[in-house]
Image: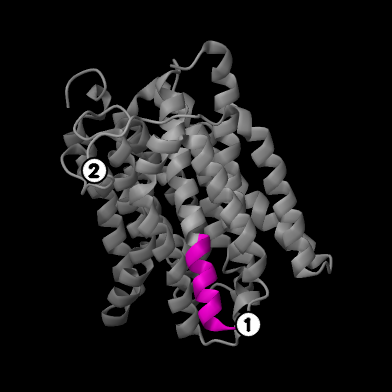
Amino acid sequence: MLQEKQGSTSRLATRLAFFVAGFITATWAVLVPYARSNTGVSDATLGSLLLCLGVGALITMPITGALTSRFGCRKVIIAALVLVILVLPLLAVITQPILLGLALLLFGIGVGVTDCAMNIQAILVEKVSTVPLMSGFHGLYSVGGIAGAGLMTLLLALGINVTVSIGVIILCVVVLAVLSYPGLLTYANPKEGPAFAVPHGIVLLLGIVCFSVFLTEGTVLDWSAVYLTQVRAMPETLGGLGYTCFAVAMTLARLTGDKVVRYFGRLKVVVAGSVIAALGLAMVIFIPVWHLSLIGYALVGAGCANIVPVMFSVVGQQTVMPQSVAVPAMTTLGYLGVLSGPAIIGYVAHFSSLSISFCLVLLLMLFVGGLAFKLNLNQIGSSTD
């Protein structure tokens, strides 16, 4: 049980952990062109290599619950960050594709463990709070992503060597890790059941919601620029604006999300969010003006913003599965959406069109709203599940 004095320290540490996770992930996104140039691989080979990152995350997420139960959140998060710090400089200098794939696998392990462990910490911290905190935590991940990509891009634009730039990034991560260290929990949920379990019951439904929302996010990330430039005839130099509008709207919505959840309740937030996201996708698909498509992408970001944080709050209060396995199981299922979503959209688009693919995502978001009613989100935690 957290003491009141420790509560604020733990909340700050959790926010810093989410910020660092987003910061590091966005830094790698800026380094992708360097990795491709150094190895000289084709687009297809690069795509295969990038899968190594996802595989690394997926193979370790399911066991992170057992690791935190045994060693505590603090040791697991710090160990994962050390691994990330050691691997990050290699990603910009490796010239052999096989070695790059191995480095990305290790990087994915570090990122995956950090992501899962910080959510376990976030659930424990929120449990002893009198107000919702999860949206704010996830909002700091988004802020970290913007900061990481912005700082790395700025350093490179100033002509600073990529290796030196990475050194600056690592220094920032070390400083933030040191600041968060006192508030990172030395414990987690006690280990119950196996190290890994297939999600079932309400945890499976929560995971399906996360899968759906993450699939939508992955679709916007990987396909928004293609759609805007090829279907809506937007200038290629402006293609990134779609994701920018999405990311900014999501960040702002998450930073205010805790108050929204407290005022309206979980169910209304999830249902309204799914409808807003679907409306945004409808604007993108059916209104042939790219300027309005940008508003549509902003609505998708705002709508999706607080759905996943609500799911993490709920999984921390359900009793169907032990939390030491429920959180990793749900996180892994959600992450599968990020990895598989862009590929699914590509296959559907190949046999039909991008517009048809986006229509399926629109229907998926409406499905999320309907599933929220079945979950009875406002009642979980106050009754047996």
Residue placed under numbered mark 1 in the picture: 95
Establish if 176 lies above or below 266. below
Q: Is residue 232 visible?
A: no
Q: Does residue 356 appear to the left or right of 153 in the view shown? A: left
Please, what secondary structure does the residue beneath circle 2 have?
Answer: loop
- Quadrant housing the N terminus: top left
Q: Of the numbered discs in the image, which one, if any, rests on residue 316? A: none
Q: Does residue 94 appear to the left or right of 375 in the view shown? A: right
Tell me which amino acid carries mark 1. Thr
Identified at 42% across, 71% down, the residue is 51
Residue placed under numbered mark 2 in the picture: 194
Distance (Cα) linking label 2 and label 1: 41 Å
Farthest residue, direction front: 70
Residue 96 falls inside the magenta stretch: yes
Residue 315 falls inside the magenta stretch: no
Residue 258: x and y in percent read: 47, 27
Identified at 27% across, 78% down, the residue is 352
Please, what secondary structure does the residue beneath circle 1 have?
Answer: loop
Residue span colored magenta: 95-107
Q: Does residue 319 appear to the left or right of 24 in the view shown? A: left
Q: How is the image coloured?
A: one colour
Q: Does residue 79 appear to the left or right of 215 in the view shown? A: right
Magenta stretch secondary structure, dominant: helix
Tell me which amino acid carries mark 2. Pro
